[in-house]
Image (cartoon, helix red, strand yellow):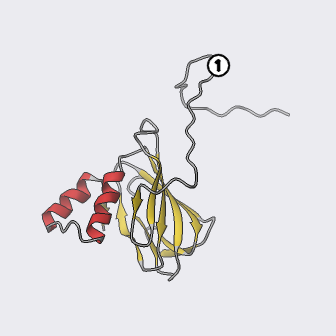
Amino acid sequence: MTFPAPAYPPQTYLGEGGEVTARFRSVDTPPELPRGSGAAHYLATGATTDGRFGLYRWDMGAEPAGAQPHFHRTISESFFVLSGALQLFDGRDWRDAAPGDFAYVPEGGVHGFRNVSGVPASLLILFAPGAPREAYFEGLVAMAEGRWEPTHEELQAFLEAHDNLYV
């Protein structure tokens, strides 16, 4: 039996024997962005992956929260539900999502997510390529906590600078 090799991307590592460059993050690592009833964990940022991707764990409390429908021009976004019950917007409808459910949204795809279940929920969010999303998340939390109250113009500039275009 033969298994034809598919086309792989161009090689980026040209060494001979491999290197010790793996990074490990324990589940006990405190979140980078603790929030009132949840947290954001910066598992792998664009800075730590040389811009290849960004991976974040977003823990949500029981109160309603999430992102309204929006799109990005420069990044794709994927969601993987770890726990709880969420709703994911696929551009047409809000779909119920449970642990193990996954959604991929290419650049330009309208999407959103929310927790309206009344119980805590957690999901992985993957951005590719690895945009610097940390400042965006930190700005959202500052607004939610009342530490930053931007004017309409400041909010629009913030959203545009972070490639978040709400519909």
List x then y, in percent, for residue 95.
52, 74
The image shows residue 5, relative to residue 64, as above or below, that is above
Q: Tell me where residue 67 appears, x and y as whole percent.
A: 38, 69
Q: Element at badge 1?
A: loop
- Tag count: 1
Q: Quadrant of the N terminus?
A: top right
Of 157 and 106, nearer the camera is 157
Amino acid type, label 1: Gly
Residue lying at the far top of the rendered structure: 16
Q: Position of residue 98 (x, y in %)?
A: 60, 72
Any part of residue 159 in sight = yes
Front-most of 96 and 2? 96
- Looking at the image, which is closer to me, 114 or 109? 114
Which residue is drawn at the image coordinates 56% and 19% (left, top)? 14
Tell me: residue 65, above or below residue 150.
below
The one nearer the camera, 125 or 122, is 122
Give the labeled residue for mark 1: 17
The picture quadrant where one finds residue 21 is top right
**From the image, which quarter does the C terminus lie in?**
bottom left
Residue 122: x and y in percent read: 53, 67
Residue occupying image coordinates x 28% and y 60%: 139
Residue 105 visible, this angle:
no
| Crowd tier of the residue under label 1, counting other residues whose Cα lies within 10 Å: few below 14, some 14–19, many 20 or above | few
> Residue at position x 24%, y 71% from top?
146
- Residue at the spot 53% in from the left edge and 27% down from the top edge: 10
Residue closest to the far bottom:
118
- In the picture as drawn, the residue positioned furthest to the right comes out as 1
